[in-house]
Image (cartoon, rainbow, N blue to C red):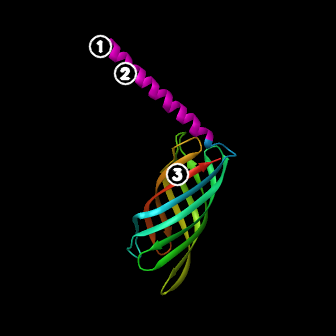
Amino acid sequence: MIFIQKQNKMKKLALFVCLLVVTVAAQAQFEKGKWIINPSVTGLNLSYNTESEKASFGLQAKGGAFLVDNVALLVSAGAQWKGGGTDTYMLGVGGRYYINKVGVYLGADFNLQREDWDGGDKTRFGFGLEAGYAFFLSRTVTIEPAAYWNINKDRSEFGLKVGFGFYF
């Protein structure tokens, strides 16, 4: 019985040490002067557009640098294809704030969106919010699931995305 109790204590101690190492490794990636590249798949057929009421799928890439610890300035580009023949192309600038040392983040961006469809074209300015988690697969590579909300004059869109982060 005493042997089993000692084994349980050792397992808890080993788990604590592993979590501590992951936390220290993650913190080092969110320091001033580090770079981030973040390609992602948006929509995943789970987003919903209040204007077209169609599911969508998209690709997006973000890249930038940490200006201060836990704060990154990012530029982004993306494309989204929606049911009904509407394509959206986006360029933007924004930032991320990493709330804690293990990768939970909040992001915001300002973007220019160009929509092309059979009935014409439209250019809009938009604002986006996202919340996600950077789960470290290695010291420099993460998988980053997130929820997002994009807003502009004519529509609002929310959905899920998953991407990879590369921290240098």
The image quadrant that residue 53 belongs to is bottom left
Q: Work out how far the residue at label 2 is from the one at label 3, CA to CA, in angstroms.
A: 36 Å
Region of the chain picked out in magenta, as a range: 1-28
**Residue 75 within the magenta-colored segment of the rendering:** no
Residue 70's tag is none
The image quadrant that residue 70 belongs to is top right
Residue 34 image position (x, y, % from top left): 67, 46
* Residue assigned mark 2: 8
Q: Are there few (<14), some (14-19), or many (20+) residues within 10 Å of tag 1? A: few
Q: Earlier in the sequence, mark 2 or mark 3?
A: 2
Measuring 65% from the left and 55% from the top, which residue is drawn there? Answer: 64
Q: For the residue labelled by badge 1, is the local secondary structure a helix, a strand or a loop?
A: loop
Q: Are there few (<14), some (14-19), or many (20+) residues within 10 Å of tag 3? A: some
Q: Earlier in the sequence, mark 1 or mark 2?
A: 1
Label pair 1/3, CB-CB below 8 angstroms: no
Q: Please, what is the three-letter code of the amino acid marked with disc 2? A: Asn
Label pair 1/2, CB-CB below 8 angstroms: no
* Residue assigned mark 3: 106
* Residue assigned mark 1: 1
The image quadrant that residue 61 belongs to is bottom right
Residue 69 image position (x, y, % from top left): 64, 43
Q: For the residue labelled by badge 3, is the local secondary structure a helix, a strand or a loop?
A: strand
Measuring 49% from the left and 30% from the top, which residue is drawn there? Answer: 18
Q: Earlier in the sequence, mark 1 or mark 3?
A: 1
Question: Which quadrant would the N terminus be assigned to in this image?
Answer: top left
Of residue 53 and residue 61, the one placed in the foreground of this image is 61
| Tag in front: 2 or 3 | 2
Q: Work out how far the residue at label 1 is from the one at label 3, CA to CA, in angstroms.
A: 47 Å
Q: For the residue labelled by badge 2, is the local secondary structure a helix, a strand or a loop?
A: helix
